[in-house]
Amino acid sequence: MSTAALQEPWAKSDNPAAPIPVHQKMSRDDLIMRIALCVLAAWLVIAVLLPLGALLIKSFEGPDGGFVGVSNFALFFANPSLTQSISNSLSIAIVSTVICVLLSFVFAYGLMRTCMPGRGIFKLISQVPLLAPSLLPAISLVYLFGNQGFAKSMMLGQSIYGPIGIGIGEVFWTFPHALIIMITALSTSDARLYEAASALKASAWRTFWTVTIPGARYGLISATFVVFTLVVTDFGVPKVIGGQFNVLATDIYKQVIGQQNFRMGAVVGLLLLLPAVFSFAVDQWVQRKQSAAMSSRAVAYEPKPDAFVDTAFLVICGLIAAAILTVIFTALFASLATLWPYNLTPSFKNYDFDNMDGGGWQSFFNSLRMAGFTAVFGTAIIFSGAYLMEKTKGFGAGRFVFQFLALLPLAVPGIVLGLGYIFFFNSPANPFNFIYGTTTILVVCSIAHFYSVAHLTAVTALKQIDQEIETVSSSLRVPFYRTFFLVTLPVSLPAVLDIAMYLFVNALTTVSAVVFIYSPQTTLASIAVLNMDDAGDVAPAAAMAMTIFFAATAVRVVYTGLVRGVLGRTQAWRHR
Amino acid sequence: MNTTQGVTVRVENCAKTFADGTRALDPVTLDVARGETLVFLGPSGCGKTTMLRIIAGLEKPDSGGRVLFNAQDVTRIPIERRNVGMVFQSYALFPNMNVAQNIAYSLALRGAGKAERDSRVAELVALTGIEGLENRNIDQLSGGQRQRVALARAVAMRPSVLLLDEPLTALDAALRERLRGELDRLLRTLGITTIYVTHDQSEAMTLGDRIVVMRKGAIAQVGSPRDIYFKPASRFVAEFIGAANIIDAVSDNGVLVLPGGRLAVDKTGHGQVAAMIRPESIGIISPEAAFLVGRVASVSFTGDRQRLVVDGASDKPLIVDASNTLAVKIGDTVGLTVAPSAIQFLQGA
């Protein structure tokens, strides 16, 4: 104890109040990171929060721009055709959600819990609807069951234009979203529970209700709310096939584009925000519950072959997959037929976009450019934001605010965000007014709209990296940005590519987020589909939708190739 | 390169209260000599890692606390400017770089030319005994090799203080034991002031010039490994380090009065005491010749020795480490002998 001056170790501090920590000089790294985080937070404020604020203000404005309280809302609720849309939206959403969740559960069960053959190909087919705008299934349904549809007799005299068509289209379009959640829910089951159940001689039926369903209950809840929100806020399907059946999402479009009644559009937009916000809250709750429910000692469930079960699921999943492919191939055939249904000779006449309304091939190239910018800038912004939020030392309040801003877009339907963009960016008083009508505003809106999912992907990837890497680097006196570029970014490459792909495909296929803010110079392919369909050029609309589909598919194929090839080599360390 | 590098470290009145009001560390004052290896030892949650992080600059002490390197106050200086080398339990090696790139990571930035970098890497690779692995990827290394790469990377920049947080804990027991010796040799070669955190007492004994035993955010004892082992300051230290018999008995003028007889001690006066005796300090002799006798309740043969539990001698069963050749079986009555100097009186709880 020669050099140790040891203080009485049991002496407690006399000061009962929590002491303040010593103030440490902020390192240059800390300062740069905090400033960068604030800049990105400011970006989110401009791209998400302020447009929503503008929407809110608009809904309380009178025709002369003054504050009129809730009178716009009173007007809305006094209009029976508008309130009818609420019940229409709700009923169609409830029916579609029940069907979609049931189908996706059965499909996911087949994929995860049975030994049916062809699970890989089934999973691939199930993701196909993500590669097309929601307009595509609606157009296909017109060709299948419409007035001149080749399967019209199957409708038994009912019309596809209206709730039936919307319901089928929405189920098709939301199916992959629900399926992903269901696959996750069914993959986190504990084999030991099944062993215990069979040791107790529980029947298969009893085991299903006491083990399988409780295990997947959070997935069921989550999928229900996600699908419900998607259906209520989707605009593409009811626009094409809704006929006289009005829903809230198409009402916004009619109020804003048709009647130029922006205030009423804002009121409907706020109403659409409600289910989305509610669903968001439920999802957050579910995520907390689910992460607590899974123990690290759980044993993965390995399904055993069972001829009867496997055949039954093969039939059911085969029917679902066939339905998905039928929708896609119908659009393809319709787009290739010279004049449906009279002249079915294949031709590329419908792909001759330059001789039609809707912006021609230029709108497709605009879309590629817009999606490309969204992928490049979006990935850079989102990944940097997630990195700064995760790695900035201290600054709890700033990081909390950033997390809130980053998750906010999850609760905002695209059509509502787009409407907010009109009010916010079109105002001459806004210094950012100059981006109105340019590709930039489309890119900004798309990044903002798809921010949250990409942000969560980045955060998950960053959390998987050893947290001490940054600590070691700073002890080695290496600036954080060097470690970011030399270590964090290369190690996170799979997530970065995943984000870029997600942003590209979604920016390519989205209609709702951009329908209010494109200009004649920046028409997009998905908008062209909408406008051509509106103008009665349904076959060219199908052709354009298929063009989008092929572009999205090509990007996915390139992505898969990259992941298997380049990443397979550089990320070898992951597999140890 | 056996030059004594590094600085003296002084921790002065450093306490740590987290934002939620949890007291992680009571005020601690401690000096570390230049080139010394000081080990913080204690169960999880005792504050030893907090202590290390305060020295590193990763945590700020409560106001009033100071950290000094070579008498210079570094409390307000962030980790980037403290010139400390760190090795973590997870090693935090850069997975996308090979061994040489990991080691040279900080060198490239210091304006070192390629030749200089290469020679420094070669030097460190030789020092840590990982020659030939320079171009291996991290995932191709064993746990022990990773640990050495992490150490080489930490000392590449010639830090003033080397901070190691449970660097062997992730390894299996046999490897840990072997690496303990190597690490000890390496730290002595480097001569850097080293602060080492562990919950493993054998590691602490092997590596530490001095050991700081911590408990519930406070220092329980500071001393050399021998001091800590043979002269524990408290019941907690005695029980935490190795096996210990702690006897509550009456001491009466140089004699400890026990149910099974008496033991001579070098302590005068009369009173209730807590006495600590290490199992290996108790000798087995024939009961006729002994002042203290007991009955063997269990015998476990562990190869290098046999551990007996002897009933009836003390207020609770005594643990005795006997020679592996001693013929003894359950139920035998044995005599026990302990040198008075091997009986340590404990204070406090």
Image (spheres, helix red, strand yellow):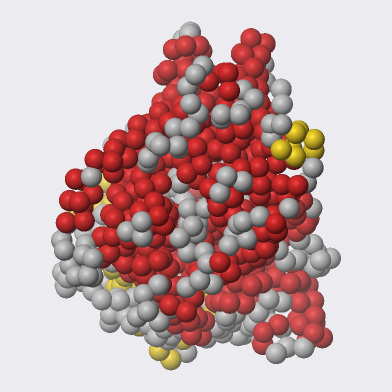
**In this rendering, does residue A251 appear at all?**
yes
Tell me the quarter of the image containing the N terminus of chain A.
bottom left
Please state the horizontal and vertical placement of residue A133, each as a whole percent of the image.
57, 47
> In the depicted view, which residue is nearer to us: B181 or B7?
B7
Up the image or down, A44 lies above or below A173; here it is below
Q: Residue at x 19, y 45 (%)?
A: A78
Residue lying farthest to the front in this orientation: A342
Quarter location, residue B290? top left
> In the depicted view, which residue is nearer to us: A560 or B138?
A560
Please state the horizontal and vertical placement of residue A325, each as a whole percent of the image.
67, 32
**In this rendering, does residue B47 appear at all?**
no
Q: Residue at x 79, y 53 (%)?
A: A565
Please state the horizontal and vertical placement of residue A43, each as a whole percent of the image.
44, 72
Query: Total label count?
Result: 0
| Residue B156 left/right relative to A38 | right
Up the image or down, A277 lies above or below B123; here it is above
> In the depicted view, which residue is nearer to us: A229 or A365?
A365
> In the depicted view, which residue is nearer to us: B289 or B307?
B307
Q: Residue at x 64, y 82 (%)?
A: B157
Quarter location, residue B54? bottom left
Residue lying farthest to the right in this orientation: B132
| Residue A245 left/right relative to A195 | left
Please state the horizontal and vertical placement of residue A295, each as a whole percent of the image.
46, 37
Q: Residue at x 50, y 11 (%)?
A: A204
Quarter location, residue A401? bottom left
